[in-house]
């Protein structure tokens, strides 16, 4: 394969930081490849991707070289970079710039000065390829999260880039929307020949699509190669990142076997079927949970719409949560989960019905950047206590506790906006937990986190419920998380459709997704 992008002994250090975010990375992306770049949250994945497009590259000290088609990236004109290097960000809200779907598709070509016939032809081709015809003339505000992310992808692909770079594009999507999105990336790679470089935590679905995989940790490139080769190397080294690999790989690694490393579900099923003939599985003992107390949060016949003449987003909502409960609010994109959470936190007001709560509220929004107001993580953590009238010593104690709990020591002097999505989420969780809230409302708390960090965050939240008696409500589209909750409230079309009680919630140590 022809070398498309190449990093040679590349290092990068953020301003006022001693430890480099990237250290001596040498990586080649061949033309036509589908490469999945993975690693723990904060390992440098997002920082590396942002180096590959000059306009997105953060300020800092650079060493080494990046080339595009054999030419130093710094010498590639911005117009050519805009056309040939497509970049899809984690949040579509940060990428959508117009109010109409059709205009969003045309905006990039208009900015580059393409003639009207060319714009119309390319927009029509991409609208057909992505199945956008049914919502072509809609306002962007009417779209679901999955549709917005698909629109962001289509608006990049209309430029016909040679390489498509995506930074955790499914972190805010439900499992079905995420699966559809990843399959679309596979089509783009196969049918259009576009080179794809993807950072992703959903390795179960991403790696089977990949021709290449690369693993980072601590700013360094650990290994690269075909997915099965990378899996074998991680197993050989006993590296923690192996726990984030697809379940087929993890099952294979948990036993002593000389069989080839499986990557896909089909390969894993064949391996497991053969193995279990001689090694029957044993059931796990259930976990007992303490009873919960009085109702501390309730919604009664709540109705809400964003626009006076718009559709109802939440319709006749009835729900209640008791003291000490750990509740999962489950549903797909566009079902009203996040809106419900904002209503419960009193960030929105219903036009009908009532919301009531007792005790201090803590809120963890889906976009952690909404919480950051200071220039460093340290300042942001202390800002949390404004208005609480806590002694300085108590503030320092709580900050130190959260820094240790959320592993923030090396991030304290960093600007929050220079952090990766996973690092930002950890800071946001620290801010929320530091107040010792009686009720903690979390919107997709594991959305931008890798497998290991996600489980650590869930353990923090569950400990708040189990050990401190706090009430925790998490909004999630990840059904795999549901077994750890005391109750699962399922939403569809703005209403509660079912409530499931877990008599014996799963131990987080046994949780997999």
Image (spheres, rainbow, N blue to C red):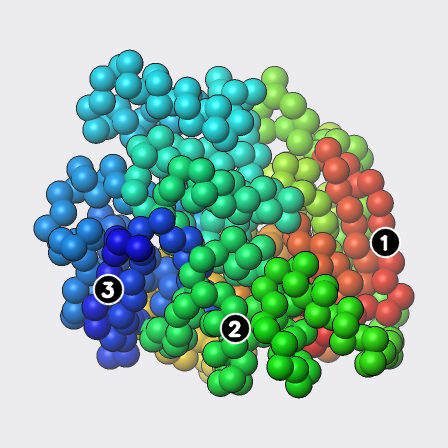
Query: Residue at position x 47%, y 72% from top?
Result: 230
**Dot 3 crowding, Cα within 10 Å, few <14, some 14–19, many 20+:** many
Q: Which residue is mark 1?
A: 500
Where residue 218 sits, quadrant-wise, is bottom left
Instruction: Say which element carries label 1.
Output: strand
Q: Is residue 172 above or below residue 126?
A: below
Instruction: Say which element carries label 2.
Output: helix
Question: As drawn, is 406 to the left or to the right of 378?
Answer: right
Q: Is residue 163 above or below residue 358?
A: above
Instruction: Locate residue 458, reporting x and y percent.
Output: 64, 68
> 123 and 345: which one is in front?
123
Instruction: Locate residue 505, reporting x and y percent.
Output: 81, 68
Query: Residue at position x 79%, y 54% from top?
Result: 488
Q: Is residue 362 visible?
A: no
Q: Which residue is mark 2?
A: 231
Q: Which residue is mark 3?
A: 7
Q: Is residue 363 above or below residue 134?
A: below
């Amino acid at each position: 394969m022809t070398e498309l992008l190449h990093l040679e002994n590349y290092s990068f250090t953020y301003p006022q930081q001693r430890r480099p975010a990237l250290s001596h990375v040498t990586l080649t992306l061949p033309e036509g490849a589908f490469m999945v770049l993975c690693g723990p949250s904060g390992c440098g994945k997002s920082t590396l991707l942002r180096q590959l497009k000059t306009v997105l590259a953060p300020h800092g000290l650079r060493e080494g070289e990046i080339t595009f088609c054999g030419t130093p990236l710094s010498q590639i004109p911005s117009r050519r970079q805009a056309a040939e290097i497509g970049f899809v960000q984690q949040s579509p809200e940060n990428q959508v710039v117009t109010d109409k779907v059709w205009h969003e598709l045309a905006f990039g070509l208009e900015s580059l000065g393409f003639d009207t016939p060319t714009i119309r032809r390319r927009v029509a081709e991409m609208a057909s390829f992505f199945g956008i015809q049914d919502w072509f003339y809609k306002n962007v505000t009417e779209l679901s999260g999955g549709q917005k992310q698909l629109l962001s992808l289509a608006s990049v692909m209309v430029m016909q880039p040679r390489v498509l770079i995506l930074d955790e594009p499914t972190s805010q999507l439900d499992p079905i929307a995420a699966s559809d999105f990843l399959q679309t990336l596979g089509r783009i790679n196969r049918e259009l020949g576009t080179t794809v470089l993807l950072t992703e935590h959903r390795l179960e679905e991403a790696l089977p699509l990949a021709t290449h995989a690369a693993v980072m940790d601590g700013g360094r490139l650990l290994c690269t190669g075909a997915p099965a080769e990378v899996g074998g190397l991680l197993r050989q080294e006993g590296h923690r990142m192996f726990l984030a690999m697809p379940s087929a790989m993890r099952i294979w690694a948990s036993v002593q076997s000389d069989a080839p490393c499986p990557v896909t579900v089909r390969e894993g099923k064949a391996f497991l079927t053969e193995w279990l003939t001689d090694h029957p599985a044993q059931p796990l003992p259930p976990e007992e949970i303490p009873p919960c107390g009085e109702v501390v949060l309730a919604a009664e016949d709540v109705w809400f719409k964003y626009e006076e003449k718009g559709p109802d987003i939440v319709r006749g909502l009835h729900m209640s949560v008791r003291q000490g409960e750990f509740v999962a609010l489950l549903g797909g994109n566009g079902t009203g989960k996040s809106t419900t959470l904002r209503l419960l936190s009193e960030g929105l007001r219903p036009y009908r019905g009532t919301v009531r709560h007792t005790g201090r509220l803590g809120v963890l929004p889906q976009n952690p950047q909404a919480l950051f107001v200071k220039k460093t993580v340290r300042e942001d953590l202390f800002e949390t206590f404004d208005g609480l009238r806590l002694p300085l010593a108590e503030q320092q104690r709580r900050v130190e506790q959260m820094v240790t709990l959320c592993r923030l020591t090396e991030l304290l002097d960093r600007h929050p906006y220079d952090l990766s999505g996973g690092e930002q989420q950890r800071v946001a969780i620290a801010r929320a937990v530091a107040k010792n809230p009686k009720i903690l409302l979390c919107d997709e708390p594991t959305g931008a986190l890798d497998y290991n960090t996600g489980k650590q965050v869930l353990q923090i939240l569950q400990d708040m419920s189990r050990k401190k008696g706090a009430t925790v409500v998490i909004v999630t589209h990840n059904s795999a998380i549901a077994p750890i909750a005391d109750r699962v409230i399922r939403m569809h079309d703005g209403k509660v459709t079912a409530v499931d009680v877990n008599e014996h919630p799963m131990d987080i140590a046994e949780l997999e997704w």
